[in-house]
Amino acid sequence: MKQPKDEERLLAAGMNRRDFLKRLGYASVVALAAGGGGLALYDSKGPASSPAQKVLTGLGDFTLRGKTPGPGKMAIVRGTDRALMLARGVEALGGMEAFVQKGDRVLIKVNAAFATPPSLGATTHPEVLAAVASLCVKAGASQVLVTDNPINDPDSCFEISGLANAARGAGARIVIPRASLFAPVSLPQGKLIEDWPVLAGVFQGVTKVMVVSPVKDHHRAGASMTLKNYYGFLGGRRNVFHQDINGIITELAQILKPTLCVLDGTVSMISNGPTGGSLSDLKETGTMVVSTDPVAADAVGVELLGRSLADVPYILMAGKAGAGQADYHQLNPVLLNTKA
Amino acid sequence: MRIVTVRRISQIFFLGLFLWFCVTATLGTAWWQLRGWPINWILSLDPLTALATILATHTFFAPLAWALATIALTLFVGRFFCGFACPLGTINQVTGWLGRLGQSPAAREEANRHRRLQAFKYYPLVCLLGLAFLGTVQTGIFDPLPLLHRSVNLALAPLADNRLGVLNDQPRYFASAWLLGVVFLAVVALNLALPRFFCRFLCPLGALFGLLSRFTPWRIGKTAGTCGDCHICEQYCEGACRPSGRFIGSECVLCFNCLHRCPAGRVTFAAKPSAAGEAGLPDLSRRGLVVAGAGLLLASMWGVGRLAGTDRDPLLIRPPGALDEERFLGRCLRCGQCMRICPGNIIQPALFQAGVQGLWSPTVNFRIGSSGCLPNCIACGQVCPTAAIRPLSLDEKKGQAKFAAQGPMRIGTAFVDRGCCLPWAMDRPCLVCQELCPVSPKAIFTRTVFETLREGQAVAARSRGPAAVDLEAAIPVTVNLASGDYYLRPSGDPEAALRRITGLAGTNLTLESPLAGPGLPATGGRVDILVRLQRPFMDAAKCTGCGMCEHGCPVSGQRAIRVYSENESRSRPGRMLI
């Protein structure tokens, strides 16, 4: 009777020891893991005042470097047929092939600010977008993207302005400014664009940038043309920058150097800008500007609105900041007339 | 010494230490005040705080490293913290004991019977850790240590001290303190239903300890499977962990009452399983976990509600140094230390200003308390256990020395409400706000105007002597025209010189001499009586949102100058000025 009980006890003791060692092992492993994990994540400094993020210094320089030293190139085309005027203008600067090579990924920045129909002229005209996008595709672009961070709801803006349809027809793709596409940018020596969210994500893999803008009256800025169109790259509560509208446009002019600018002054919004809303706000000004220099393009646009550079201070300021030539005559623009 | 004696001494020590740290969390330089006392030490022992903030921030904030010691000890011996250290556990144990004095052994045994619902506490734990993983730390709402700190800081200590005035000279007020008191009283009162009710059924920290003690090498056990079945151990079991039967180690709070009470000495704390068998964890049901998951889903919709985004309550002002809202909610425990320490008593527990997810988080209210946010005070950030409010230096708060370029820390911007401001809307001189503005040069500046009194238009009058004017009839004003703020001018001549009224007797006004100059009516003319008003304007670029102006504004309800979170330093997208 006694013998088996002892055996049982010995067996139980052995099992207990094994179980104890196993548990000791588990506890030690978890303790070490907790300690190791704690050490790996150990933060002796505490949180920084603002979340750490990689900050870009700009959106890039997409000019044709080396090929066009000195002042930029410009064509001023008179007429009424937007596609024809654009084609002539581009042709005068060497054709789209001079700007877009096979395999290029082209980003077209339009002004899609408002969810209004193209007839009201508050947005880039879809015919111009279609013409530019088609020329890019014809020149061999592998992909043509169209974007803007508009003022009204983005989807509605692209649809109602006719830009979405134009893009689809020309084989281009609209990029809606999703939150994930914004990244902070700080312009070196800038005062306003400092750690500010900018639509940088759409530039992923982009090799050429075209800015296609209408000519509009703008009560705060004096005029909204090519450079003011850059405002649509800004994210966040960007309207704080209206406190220094000329300053912000000048800084914007420095964060991006586009390949080509198209300023459509076929019909210009001469009053009640930048929203317009009535045909009476529009005037036929019959001019299309194709230019490698955004500042020079705007200097022409100002004349279409019957204003001077003094009325629109950011043009001279951007010129001084090195973004282009405010005296567009220096570019020896090619003057054309499609009606002739 | 018997182990239960050690346990009781330890409980008294930790409860005493907790209370002592609550006392020393008082701004001041006396030996019993905040001068290096580690008032957050008990909070920093808390592994739930450590784990939740790690999940939310992906960093392990150094002062929370004490939790590693708690974790390590728990892994080897079990829930010692619940039995030996937790001050709320001690309060629960004492109340439960008091509530059961004189009860029959059978009633005691029944009260300490293990109940399946004790598994409930694991579900809130799952939910809270899930939320932390999503970036919002809500553990402090239920975690006993922040809960007790909050209850004492914001409800019990003011209740006890507001008449005595020992801790603070002035009474302390906290918005919705009643609710905090109700929660605390409920936790305590539940002990009358069942002993250590909160610990057994609700405590997420206890649940975490339960998980950690799943594989403790040492634990309570019996040396024989069957014993006399006297169940005395069960009568005194704090954890309701079934010491006489199949022992549930994760529920044992290490009170050692079983070991102490067993008449046969069969209960041991040893490196072997109980002879009566043991269960690792209580039975967790799939349904419970599904409910926890559903709770998580519900809570994750807070993000959809956009409460932390652009639709945030503009009156939600966080203390200086508070992180941007997203990172703030990834750290704040709602322990109330910042509110306890704030000398102005302006840091208040939010009810719903910060959304559901910001319950009891600190918000600044300039209408309660004794002042605005003091420019030379950085107490709140210094006592924050998790740096949800960063520990600022005075230099950083005031924007001086190496912080000169970024300027002072702004918690908001004050706006003048011209509709209810005395000089703007009621023709009354005031200017308290400008006087109190502590910024140099002052953020509030003034523009002076002279306005004709409502009753002072074209009053019939004639001059009498070189420095006096007689009114034809007394004008029915309630202000003191001789106070120095009132002036007289011939009617219909806005260019005429204004004469300050220096004396008033009946209808006779004395004017500041010399009275030279044309225009005063010799006989039968009319004069206007005007008030000189300095109207406040805000230079928002200089305003730090300290709220001195709002606190001091004589319009006592909705103040005529109010601070909104506009332009606060902590959220750059919230900035108003460029």
Image: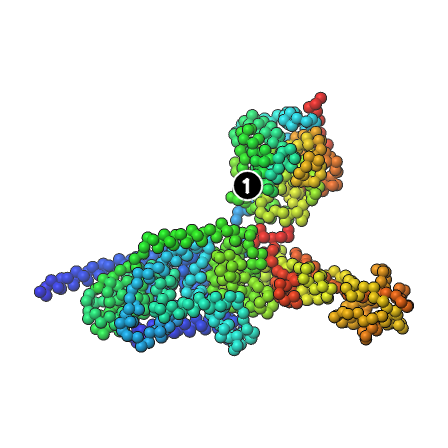
Residue that extends furthest to the top in the rendered view of this protein: A340
The residue carrying mark 1 is: A177
Quadrant, the N terminus of chain A: bottom left
Q: Secondary structure at mark 1?
A: loop
- Report the side of B324 relative to A329 (left or right): left
Residue lying at 19% horizontally and 62% vertically, measured from the top left: A13
Quick check: can you spot residue B315? yes
Q: Please give the count of numbered marks on the rendered protein.
A: 1
Locate residue A289, reporting x and y percent: 67, 31
Locate residue B265, reporting x and y percent: 22, 72
Which image quarter: residue A95? top right
Which image quarter: residue A156? top right
Which of B529 and B378 lies nearest the eye of the viewer? Answer: B529
Residue lying at 62% horizontally and 35% vertically, measured from the top left: A117
Residue lying at 71% horizontally and 31% vertically, measured from the top left: A285
| Image: B560 above or below B99 | above
Quick check: can you spot residue B438? no
| Image: B311 above or below B480 | above
| Image: A319 above or below A92 | below
Locate residue A32, reporting x and y percent: 35, 57
Which image quarter: residue B416? bottom right
Which of B462 and B74 lies nearest the eye of the viewer? Answer: B462
Quadrant, the C terminus of chain A: top right
Q: Amino acid at mark 1?
A: Pro
The residue marked by circle 1 belongs to what chain? Answer: A
- Report the side of A168 relative to B145 (left or right): right
- Tell me the crowding category of disc 1: few under 14, some 14 to 19, or many 20 or more residues within 10 angstroms, Cα based: many
Residue lying at 57% horizontally and 31% vertically, measured from the top left: A166
Which of B507 and B82 lies nearest the eye of the viewer? Answer: B507
Residue that extends furthest to the left in the rendered view of this protein: A1
Locate residue B123, reporting x and y percent: 37, 57
